[in-house]
Amino acid sequence: RATNAVVCLSKVPQLQVSVNYTTESATMNVAKSGYRVFSANSSAACTELAKKITERLGVELGKSVVFQESNRETRVDVKESVRGQTIFIIQTIPRDVNTAIMELLVMAYALKTSCAKNIIGVIPYFPYSKQCKMRKRGSIVCKLLASMLAKAGLTHIITMDLHQKEIQGFFSFPVDNLRASPFLIQYIQEEIPDYRNAIIVAKSPAAAKRAQSYAERLRLGLAVIHGEAQCSESDMADGRHSPPCVRNTTGHTGLELPLMMAKEKPPITVVGDVGGRIAIIVDDIIDDVGDFVAAAEILKERGAYKIYIMATHGLLSADAPRLIEESAIDEVVVTNTVPHEVQKLQCPKIKTVDVSMILAEAIRRIHNGESMAYLFRNITVDD
C-alpha cells in the first residue's frame, strides 16, 4: 500500500502541471483579443474579406472546417473551444446564395451548441433583401431569413447598406447597418479627374434620396431618370395588370368595386441638365445591369461625356460583365462586400473599393462596448 501511494503521489504533480499548462495556454490565446472570428464560407474566394478584416484586427481566423458532402449537405466542424466566448462569424455571399445561407446557419448553431456566449454575424451583403415587400401571393422572404438566423443562435448582426432600412425591424436582436458611402465618395474625389464637373444621377425616383445625399456631401448637382423602357419586365413584378381592367359582372351586383386603372409610366426621360458633365449613377445594388445600361445610353444622348456607376454591392449576375464592357458605361465601382474577382477579369471597367476597415472597426467597438456613432458621422438619414 505504501508503494502504491508513493507512485500515485509522484504522478499527480506531473498531471497537474500538464493541465495547468494547457489551461494557461488557452487562456493566453483568448486574452490576446477576448473574442474569436470565424469564416463560415466553404470556398476560398469568399474568405478574402474575412482575412483582410482579421489582419486589421490583429487576430487569426478561428479554426473550423466548412464543406459540402457528396450529397450536397453542409457540414461544419469547429476545431477549438468557444465556451463562454464572443464569436464573430464573417459570411460573404457568393453566387450560390442558398449554400452560403445554410453554411451560416449551421455554423451559428454549432457555436450555439458549443456554449458560445454571444454569436455576432458579420454579413456585409444581406441576401434576399430585395424580397422585403409583399408581391401578389408571394412572401416576405427577408423576414423569414431573419427569423431563421435568430433561431440558429445569432444575437447581433453587422451588415452594410440594407436595400431597405425597414428590414432592421424584421430582427428580434440588434442590427448595425453600416454605410459604404464615405468610401465611394472618397473614390470619387481621388480617382475621378475633374469630379467638380460631375452630376449625381438617380436611376429612378426611388433612388433620389440616396443620390441627394451624395450630391449634398460632394456639393454637386442632381439629376433623376424618370420612366422606363416599354415592355419592361417590371410590368409583371409590380402587379400593374392585376386585377384586370375589365369589370367582372358575374359577381353579386351589390359588391361592385370602382374600376381600377392600370398604372403606366412614361418613356425614359432625364430631369436635370447632364450636357457636358460627368454623370455618376449611385445605387445600393448592381445585379442585372440592363437598367444601368439603358440609363447610360439616355445620359449619353443628353450630352454626358463620361458615365460612372457607384454601388455598394456588386452582384453582377449572368452576362453583366459583357454588357458593361459593350455599353456606354466608362467605369463601375463597387465594394468588396460580395466577391467578384471573376467578373473583374471579364471586364476591366469594374473597380473595387475595400471596406474591410469599417467592418473591422465595428467588430472592435462592439467587443469593447464602445459607441458606434463614430462610424455614422456625417451620414444622413436618407443615405
Image: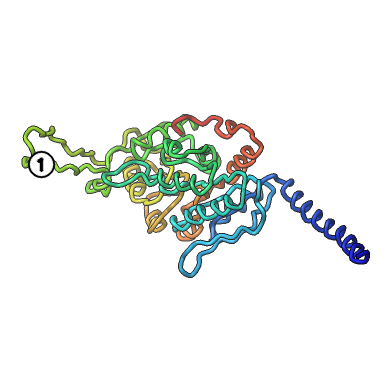
Q: Residue furthest front?
A: 1
Please tell me which residue is depicted at 57% across the width and 44% down the height of the picture. 120
Rendered residue at 93%/64% (across/down): 2
Left or right: 89, with 344 as reference point:
right
Q: Is residue 227 left or right of residue 191?
A: left
**Relative to 267, residue 91 above or below:** below
Q: Quadrant of residue 299?
A: top left
Q: Amino acid at mark 1?
A: Val
Counting from the top left corner in percent of width and height, residue 47 is at 57, 56
- Indicate the position of residue 177 as horizontal and vertical percent values: 50, 38
- Return the residue nearer the eye: 100 or 215: 100
Quarter residue 65 falls in: bottom right
User: What x and y, as percent, mark residue 349?
Assistant: 46, 53
User: In the orientation shown, which residue stands out farthest toward the bottom?
Assistant: 70
Q: Is residue 292 left or right of residue 186?
A: left
Mark 1 residue crowding within 10 angstroms, few (<14) / some (14–19) / many (20+): few
Look at mark 1 in the image and give the residue it sits on. 246
Which residue sits at x=43%, y=47%?
A: 145
User: Can you say whether 191 is above or below 205 in the image?
Assistant: below
Residue found at x 60% / y 47%: 88
Residue 331, x across and y down, in percent: 45, 49
Q: Is residue 333 visible to us here?
A: no
Circle 1 — which element? Answer: loop
Quadrant placement of the N terminus: bottom right
Q: How many marks?
A: 1
Q: 42 or 335, which is in the foreground?
A: 42
Regarding residue 104, the answer to whether it shows in the image is yes
